[in-house]
Image (spheres, rainbow, N blue to C red):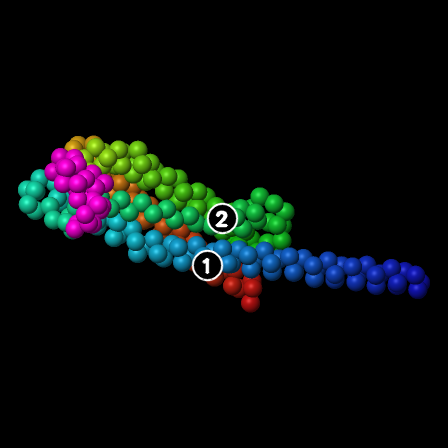
Amino acid sequence: MLIVIGISIAWKINELNDIRKNNIVQKKIYANLNEELHTNLRLLDGLIDEYPQKITYLENTLNYVGKNPSEITQGAKDTIINLFDKDVNLLDNSINSIVSTTKFEFIEKNDLKDLIILYPNKILLYKEQNEKIQAIVTNRIKPVLVNYISLADKFPDGKLKYERIKKMGTKSDYIGLLANKEYQNSIIDRILQTQIQLNNVKTLRGKTSTLITKLKLELD
């Protein structure tokens, strides 16, 4: 009888130790994911502010089409050649690790599991759309810019060492650039794709916020 009781107690202790270990692992998984999601939330908030500005700059570029050379001020030139092609990479290491490994088994709440399963697809949608925009910039806009814009414009005025190239070098042709059909179409396409990405970012921001709220309940 004493042997049976001893075995039962030992089994219970092992069970409690397993539960304790699982809780520690679960908390660590939640903490890592929570940190990643908060980083993404900050990045997404920045993009929600940034994308409308990009769209406005691109629309302003199109507004210079058909203007006289005298109307293309230095500010207008700066707007035209500013590509605004900063790349923002959202984090997905922790959540992909959860979805693709046994870590997923430590998630207890079904509603949290559902959110975690769907989240990587939203990140992938953002990445694919970002690649589309980058392709427009790299493969369509930049090649046209090279044909019409001289990098000598980047040199400051009044510097003796740059005087010759600025005076004798091939001049930039902003009017020709603005009249170029491929340039116009690529700018329009970029506006449309950026508007799509803005909607993607807003949706992803909502999903990220919801996940953070659910995780907070588990961490508290």
Front residue of 111/62: it is: 62
Q: Residue at x 34, y 53 (%)?
A: 47
- Amino acid identity at mark 1: His
Front residue of 202/113: it is: 202
Magenta range is 150-176
- Amino acid identity at mark 2: Asp
Front residue of 43/142: it is: 142
Q: Residue at x 61, y 45 (%)?
A: 101
Q: Does residue 92 lie above or below 132 as drawn?
A: below
Q: Is residue 119 left or right of residue 84?
A: right
Whether residues under marks 2 and 1 lie with C-beta atoms below 8 angstroms apart, the answer is: no
Q: Is residue 156 in the magenta section?
A: yes
Of helix, strand and loop, which one carries label 2? Answer: loop
Q: Residue at x 17, y 41 (%)?
A: 164
Residue 135: image tag: none
> Which quadrant of the structure image shows residue 186?
top left
Category of crowding for the residue at label 1, using alpha-carbon neighbours closer than 10 angstroms: few (below 14), some (14–19), many (at least 20): some
Say if residue 80 shows up in the picture: no
Q: Is residue 112 left or right of residue 87?
A: right
In the rendering, at what x and y percent does residue 97 appear?
Answer: 56, 47
> Which quadrant of the structure image shows residue 187?
top left
In the rendering, at what x and y percent does residue 202 appear?
Answer: 35, 52
Q: Farthest residue toward the front? A: 160
In the rendering, at what x and y percent does residue 61 appear?
Answer: 17, 45
Q: Residue at x 31, y 45 (%)?
A: 85
Quarter in which the N terminus is drawn: bottom right
Residue 38: image tag: 1
Q: Is residue 184 in the magenta section?
A: no
Q: Is residue 4 left or right of residue 90?
A: right
Q: Farthest residue toward the bottom? A: 220
Residue 92: image tag: 2
